[in-house]
Amino acid sequence: MRIGCPKEIKNHEYRVGLTPESVKELTVHGHEVLIESGAGMGIGATDAEYRTAGAEITEGPDPIFATCEMVVKVKEPQAVERAKLREGQVLYTYLHLAPDPEQTADLVKSGVTAIAYETVTGPGGTLPLLKPMSQVAGRMSIQAGATALEKAHGGRGVLLGGVPGVLPGKVVVIGGGVVGFNAAQMAVGLGADTTILDRDPEVLEKLGIHFESRAKTRFSNKANLEESVAEADLVIGAVLVPGAAAPKLVTRAMLGSMRPGAVLVDVAIDQGGCFETSHATTHAEPTYVVDDIVHYCVANMPGAVARTSTYALNNVTLPHALRIAQLGWKEAIRQSPHLANGLNVSGGKVTYEAVAKELGYDYVPVTEVLG
């Protein structure tokens, strides 16, 4: 198969879809790989390293979109990239379609077969291609929140860990999944007064066993959420409904109960955000203020630590990429129900039920697309 990897063009996105090591693995199995010149510079991978691994280097993305059977990326294709996609081509990347009607319409119109990293499943309903970036984003959320809390960045001027004789900052993590667990680990490690809210009793039990007295757990109902948010210096939104838009758990009215200069970090912003006042920001301008509350809503947080993120991502995306290249996307999906769950759009049809429901498309099961 002819596989292409263009340079990411989203604001301050330094990750790359394929590392030189991944290219080597694909070429060893007989596949042809095209890499856009400079695609790997954000992780310190030169064109020469990609050539050594067996890739052909292209000037610009056009040869990749025009000739490759599969395009491997990190972030969702931007409008200029979507215009280059074509029928029969496989797009393998993060998509987050539910809160993005424009992207969905363009993918449907193009006829492309779009496989989303974030909905590929693993045993027990896990999301193995989302997990490493959730780990990174969860850990980064505390770093970002701690910085935003500094007075020079608009925050309350609170040090999360406190110092002897001064109480630590209060961190509230909404959601006890992968993002929430990693955020809580970082917050606890800094010495912050940490509370985790979740609706699943089993999740709360596991968190309680892991953190013991180092973090508190609370059942996430409206009263507990309102009380916890009102007392917080830093709130981490770590809620995920796979493939669907995130619920708006923190309302604008709740901001009025918070201390001026408190910080909200919305890690769910890729799926539309879990705060009513959230809108996507970039690493260039990561924060904004609503009702005296600082909001950090960067939609590609792991892009800031591109090398760590890229290698962690390739560890889990490469096996499926290789399977698609070896078997073709249809046979690869027939053989792997987990990969089949990643199919969001194909041949002008929406094949992921949550996306179809959210955006008003007719849902077409994967089995019908496969014929």
Image (cartoon, rainbow, N blue to C red):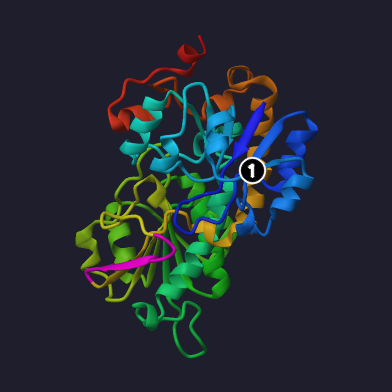
| 270 magenta-colored | no
Q: Main secondary structure of the magenta part?
A: loop
Q: Residue at x 42, y 54 (%)?
A: 299
* Residue 268, horizontal then vertical, whole percent: 40, 51
Q: Is residue 197 left or right of residue 249?
A: right
**Would residue 219 be found to the left or right of residue 184 on screen?**
left
Whether residue 281 sits left or right of residue 306 in the image: it is left
Residue at x-position 36% and y-position 67%: 287
Location of residue 174 by image quarter: bottom left
What's under tag 1, amino acid-wise? Ile
Is residue 283 shown in magenta? yes
Which residue: 32% across, 51% down? Answer: 221
Quarter of the picture containing the N terminus is top right
Percent of width and height locating residue 291: 21, 69
Magenta part of the chain: 282-291
Whether residue 81 appears in this view of the structure is yes
Q: Residue furthest front?
A: 59
Q: Nearer the viewer, residue 135 or 45?
A: 45
- Percent position (x, y) of residue 360? 27, 27
Q: Which residue is depicted at the point 39% across and 65% down?
A: 286
Which of the pair 83/122 is nearer the observer? 83
Q: Position of residue 180 (x, y in %)?
A: 49, 55
**Disc 1 secondary structure class:** strand
Question: Which residue is identified by label 1?
Answer: 35
* Mark 1 burial class by Cα count in 10 Å: few <14, some 14-19, many 20+: many
Could one spot residue 198 in this view of the protein?
Answer: no
Residue sticking out furthest to the top: 371
Tell me the quarter of the picture where residue 122 sits.
Answer: top right
